């Protein structure tokens, strides 16, 4: 798993979460390269679609189709409280608001590293005070209890919705405790990665 924040021109900030297919040393060695490529290329592309299309071609060349990367890329503009995003085959991030159903951020395109020349749709959302944006990897929602039932996106959404008064750090702790309580063990079978943004 990878997550990071990248400073962009015009005081914007990119928020990224990603997951490389497979496990072990090979997948681990690929991620540092991906991080360097992200940080070098993201500031060069004002257009999110252009960036992901170009970045996908880079990943295709590096992996030769042997591995793929799911990635969520969000470009946050603090001045306008807006977020433009594209989802490259990753678990849809969740926009959670009080008294509203969770809004999964699904616009985008295929995973990176498989189809050169792929296009990626974008969506721009406006963040309101109290909104919580949850970025996560599959290890969170696919965590299983002793009976084999998965934690699920629905449980994640409900956990956050019930604790919207908490700040981002507190919410992370609440989610983690919820997953551990659900599994009935502190051991995890996969990485557990979350990024939370809360509009104050």
Image (cartoon, grey):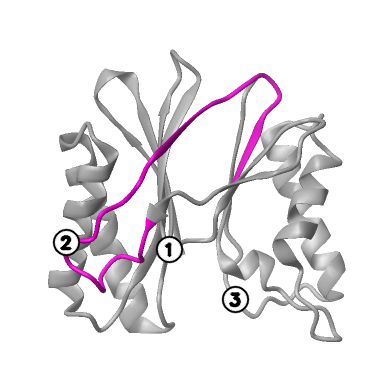
Percent across and percent down for residue 38 are 25, 50
In which image quadrant can residue 190 be found?
bottom right
Q: Is residue 165 above or below residue 190?
A: above
**Residue occupied by mark 1:** 89
Which residue bears the numbered disc 3?
A: 190
* Dot in front, 3 or 1: 1
Q: Nearer the viewer, mark 2 or mark 1?
A: 2
> Which residue does the image show at 29% across and 74% down from the upper left?
29
Judge left or right: residue 118 versus residue 170. Answer: left
The magenta stretch spans residue 122: yes
Q: Which contiguous range is marked in magenta?
A: 109-134
Residue 117's mark?
Answer: 2
Q: CA distance from mark 3 to mark 1?
A: 19 Å
Quarter occupied by the C terminus? top right
Corner quadrant of residue 129? top right
Are dots 3 and 1 in contact, CB under 8 Å?
no
Residue in the image at 77% along x and 35% along y: 100
Q: Determine if the magenta segment contains residue 104.
A: no
Labels 3 and 2: the sequence-earlier one: 2
For the residues labelled 3 and 2, the Cα–Cα distance comes to: 31 Å
Task: Locate residue 23 relative to residue 99 in the image: left or right.
Answer: left
């Amino acid at each position: 798993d990878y997550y990071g924040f990248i400073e962009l021109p015009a005081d914007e900030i990119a928020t990224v979460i990603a997951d490389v297919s497979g496990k072990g040393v090979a997948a681990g060695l690929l991620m540092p390269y991906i991080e360097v490529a992200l940080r070098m290329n993201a500031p060069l592309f004002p257009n999110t679609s252009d960036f992901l299309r170009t970045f996908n071609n880079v990943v295709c060349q590096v992996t030769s189709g042997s591995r793929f990367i799911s990635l969520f890329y969000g470009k946050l503009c603090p001045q306008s409280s807006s977020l433009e995003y594209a989802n490259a085959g990753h678990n849809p991030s969740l926009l959670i608001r009080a008294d509203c159903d969770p809004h999964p951020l699904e616009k985008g395109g295929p995973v990176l590293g498989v189809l050169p020349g792929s296009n990626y749709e974008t969506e721009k959302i406006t963040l309101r005070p109290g909104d919580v944006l949850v970025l996560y990897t599959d290890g969170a929602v696919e965590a299983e209890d002793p009976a084999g039932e998965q934690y699920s996106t629905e449980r994640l959404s409900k956990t956050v919705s019930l604790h919207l008064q908490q700040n981002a750090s507190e919410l992370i702790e609440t989610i983690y405790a919820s997953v551990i309580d659900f599994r009935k063990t502190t051991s995890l079978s996969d990485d557990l990665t979350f990024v939370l943004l809360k509009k104050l």
